[in-house]
Image (cartoon, rainbow, N blue to C red):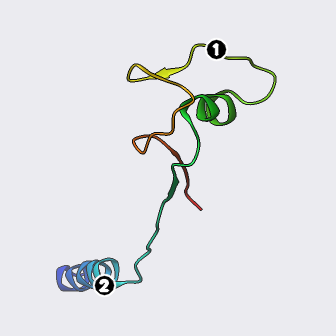
Amino acid sequence: MSYSMMLARAASLLLIFLFGPRAMAQLVVGTTQSPSALVQNVLLGNGVAVSNVTFNGAPGNVLNDQIGDFDGT
């Protein structure tokens, strides 16, 4: 294969990758659960008990916009 043929092939592949279809995604973040609910439902699951949950020194049953869960689908 000649050098010019390889260069043309590489250039066409580069153009395809640069200007081809693009994927887009969006994360949906939910901030409706308290820190203790997030620990119990997201991190631990059923069958595990947790106590004395605090977030930045605040009690675990207070809602806070700084934490949440997300669904990446």
Residue density around tag 2, few if under 14, some if 14–19, many if 20 or more, within 10 Å: few
Image quadrant holding the C terminus, namely bottom right
- Of labels 1 and 2, the one closer to you: 1
Task: Please state which of residues 40 and 19 is positioned toward the viewer in this rendering.
Answer: 40
Q: Going 41% across and 83% down the picture, which residue do you hit?
A: 21
Question: Considering the numbered disc 2 on the image, is that residue within a helix, a strand or a loop?
Answer: helix
The answer to whether residue 44 is left or right of residue 1 is right
| Residue 44 location (% of width, % of height) | 67, 27
Task: Please state which of residues 38 and 61 is positioned toward the viewer in this rendering.
Answer: 61
Q: Going 37% across and 84% down the picture, which residue do you hit?
A: 20
Question: Considering the numbered disc 1 on the image, is that residue within a helix, a strand or a loop?
Answer: loop
Reading the image, the residue beneath label 2 is 19
Q: Going 57% across and 29% down the picture, which residue do you hit?
A: 61
Q: In the image, what residue type sits under mark 2?
A: Phe
State whether residue 16 is above or below residue 25.
below
State whether residue 71 is above or below residue 15.
above
Residue density around tag 1, few if under 14, some if 14–19, many if 20 or more, within 10 Å: few
Q: Going 50% across and 44% down the picture, which residue do you hit?
A: 68
Residue 67 placement: quadrant: top left
| Residue 6 location (% of width, % of height) | 25, 79
Marks 1 and 2, how far apart at CA: 53 Å
Residue 18 placement: quadrant: bottom left
Task: Please state which of residues 2 and 65 is positioned toward the viewer in this rendering.
Answer: 65
Reading the image, the residue beneath label 1 is 51
